[in-house]
Image (cartoon, rainbow, N blue to C red):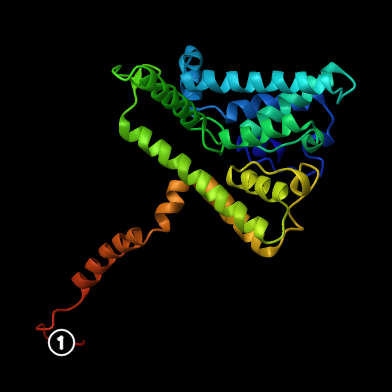
Amino acid sequence: CHSFATLATGGFSTHTASVGHFDSVYIETVIIIFMFLAGTNFSLHHLGIKGKLSVYWRNEEFRFYLTLCTLATLFIVAVNSYHQVYATFGQTLRTAVFQVISVVTTTGFGTADFDQWPPALKILLVSLMFVGGCAGSTGGGIKMVRILLFFKFARLQLRNLVHPRTIGTLKFGKVKVPQEVMVAILGFLALHIGVFLFASLVVTALGVDIVTGTTAVIATLNNIGPGLNLVGPAQHFGHLPPLAKGVLSFCMLAGRLELYTVAVLLTPDFWQMARKPVWRWQMAKAPSPSSSTPYRL
């Protein structure tokens, strides 16, 4: 069960304490490795199996993925060590690595109640929930490549403000990124934020406190699982109002299918275009008014 939930980044466990139930560094290490692999672009795995292992490091998205996980882990280790959250450095490092990989890959497994960690780490983990895994992986979220290109685009715009006559080129690796792709990414980010704000507004309007409501939306929209406060790693969603559960269910579906897919399905133009082939087929099958009634045998 845990093996399936790891590779699918589903995060479902047969135990209330999730992976923390086993309290085994060996089990956690295996799950960490395969969560990280599940959050990686599977086209890289395909090439890696063929012996082309250098494709991992040559891929800019993978380098960003690895760097982000490493920096987040080091920051959590430093803050938890400063506040003496755990008795030993080994336990601090162990929980930090597991929770960072679990959140970034949107798996949602837990070995510690990070809702009890210092506030700075809660902010970091909630921010990482938005990022998600690499494109072409089983992870949810916005995806690493979109975040990376967004920062590249922001840097390019700042450079153009300082040097207005400079013609900058946006590249991903050695490939030039077309303007249409960047517009689509910015549109996706705007749609993602818009759905998050609207869903948070509805959930909190139903009487759910702001921390529980907003992190519940973040956790479901990005397919993480646990949020903070009343929906933290040691809690559940069962106490939420029925309408709030309906909104969060929609967020889970929209986040898993990608927002553009769901947004297109909700537009009237899509259904109008979808009905046209059916209407043409029905007209072709319908008998002509001038045709005679066929004989019955």
215 with respect to 48 (left or right): right
292 with respect to 186 (left or right): left
Quarter of the image where the C terminus is located: bottom left
Seen as rendered, the residue at the extreme right is: 87
Q: Nearer the viewer, residue 4 or 219?
A: 219
The residue tagged with tag 1: helix, strand or loop? loop
From this view, report whether residue 296 is shown above or below residue 110.
below
Residue at 71 percent of width and 41 percent of height = 1
Image spot of residue 46 (x, y percent): 47, 24
From this view, report whether residue 296 is shown above or below residue 150.
below
Residue at 68 percent of width and 62 percent of height = 206
Residue at 68 percent of width and 64 percent of height = 242
The residue at which mark 1 appears reads as: 293
- Res 258 visible: no
Residue at 50 percent of width and 18 percent of height = 48
From this view, report whether residue 124 is shown above or below residue 54.
below
From this view, report whether residue 208 is shown above or below residue 99.
below
**Quadrant of res 31:** top right
**Quadrant of res 201:** bottom right
**Quadrant of res 15:** top right
Q: Nearer the viewer, residue 48 or 70?
A: 70
Decide: few, some or many residues near mark 1? Use Cα within 10 Å; few <14, some 14-19, many ≥20: few
